[in-house]
Image (spheres, grey):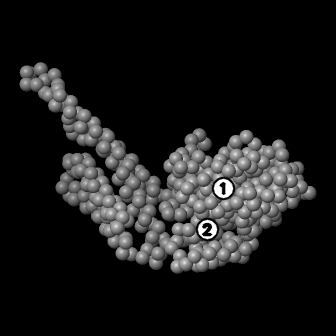
Amino acid sequence: MRNRSGWWMIIIVMLLLDFYVFQVIKALTSGVTEKSKITIFSIYWTLSISAIAFLLLLPYFNTDTWPKSVRNYLFATFVGLFVAKLLAAIFFVLDDARRAITWVLSKVFPETDTGTNTNAGWNLNRSAFLSWLGIGVGGSFLGTFIYGFSNKYNYQVKKIQLAYKNLPKGFKGLKIVQISDIHSGSFGDKKAVQRGVDMILEEGADLILFTGDLVNDQADEMLHYKDVFSKIKAPMGVFSTLGNHDYGDYVSWPSPTAKKQNLENLKQVHKQMGWQLLMNEHVALERNGDSIALLGIENWSALARFPKYGRMDLAYDGTERYPFKILMSHDPTHWDAEVRPKYSDVDLMLSGHTHGMQFGLETPFFRWSPVQWVYKQWAGLYEEGNQKLYVNRGYGFIGYPGRVGILPEITVIELV
């Protein structure tokens, strides 16, 4: 009952928002022809009513049986329309606040009939500037949101050099490719995914590391893509770890046994692709007569809504003798919460998880995404003392079938 009440509350909010925005549209179109008004109003209410009807009927649909692309685009368009109206409404509310203040002032200082009209000129009409600004911001957001659909396979190679004084001589010049958050259950274009894999192979990395979230929920999401990702090879191996989505925690399983079997199946997928899955353990990497440690833990998050499967104590045990350590840990909150305070000799931690929210703005001088309100470290390189963290923006996508500003990433790290 509580869920149903919440559902109806969302619908009521949407209706109120639709009528509120429509009042502004009516005001802005007061000077156009009746034919133009009918066209504009028809388009507006067709989209609005379709969105509400979709939400009303959603509980009666088994969306799991829908094609992934249809499901993803419908949900994304629905969210895009709602957020666009919400953004526009912010400016309309500002304008209405101005009008309310003006109305109060007009009552306190009414216009006089003395001929001097000293308080004349109170304007209670809507501001054309704020109204058009709201429409422009909301429309721009929706247009950008839809444009982002075309960016979901627009893989970007980001290259960085990391310098360490304690890096063994034999590992200088080591080239690592990091990928993260494949989310194969969201894919719909195998050729596009293959292009990304080809880009990975073109880098000629010595070592390839995958930092979790191979699937959205279920191991069988990889059936159609296992042959693609099994092509990823490197002279020193391909190593992987698990992310929060890999455990099947967001699916209603028929039994605990079925959930456990799904995880076992996923482990087998890693093995079948030739990837060595590190489960709270470490391996020694050897190059030119020197050795370093590579640690991989299961998902561990400082945020309460994500379970802590990782055991850093198990992965770290025995690595004390290595002069240099690389840690694969899916969630970047692990760095501040446990790695830095307790394991100060972990030189480099590689994470993913945030996707940069698949939405934001990145320039050489400025970087922003709403995800930074939740995650302190959310994309790119971070340094504290001698320790470094790199957060990969993700290879795939989930939820929103696109990317705006924060593009899918293939990271190339050279140790110097």
**Which image quarter: residue 79?**
bottom left
Q: Is residue 216 left or right of residue 160?
A: left
Q: Using the rendered image of the protein, determine whether residue 200 is visible from the camera's viewpoint.
A: no
Say which amino acid is labelled 1. Ser
* Residue appearing at x 61%, y 68% in the figure: 246
Which secondary structure, mark 1? strand
* Residue appearing at x 65%, y 53% in the figure: 334
Q: Is residue 32 left or right of residue 192?
A: left
Q: Is residue 81 left or right of residue 18?
A: right
Measured as percent of width and height from the top left, residue 154 is found at 58, 60
Q: Residues within 10 Å of mark 1 (few under 14, many from 20)?
A: many
> How many labels were placed on the picture?
2
Quarter of the image containing the N terminus? bottom left
Q: Nearer the viewer, residue 343 or 380?
A: 343
**Which image quarter: residue 53?**
bottom left
Please say if 251 is above or below 14. Answer: below
Q: Earlier in the sequence, mark 2 or mark 1?
A: 2
Q: Nearer the viewer, residue 73 or 298?
A: 298
Question: How far apart are the alpha carbons under marks 2 and 1?
Answer: 15 Å
Q: Is residue 216 left or right of residue 229?
A: left
Q: Residues within 10 Å of mark 2 (few under 14, many from 20)?
A: many
Q: Nearer the viewer, residue 43 or 290?
A: 290
Point out which mark residue 246 bears.
2
* Residue appearing at x 78%, y 45% in the figure: 163
Asked if labels 1 and 2 touch by Cβ distance under 8 angstroms, the answer is: no
Measured as percent of width and height from the top left, residue 337 is found at 64, 49
Please say if 338 is above or below 77. Answer: above
Point out which mark residue 351 bears.
1
Say which amino acid is labelled 2. Asp
Which secondary structure, mark 2? helix
* Residue appearing at x 45%, y 56% in the figure: 145
Measured as percent of width and height from the top left, residue 257 is found at 60, 78
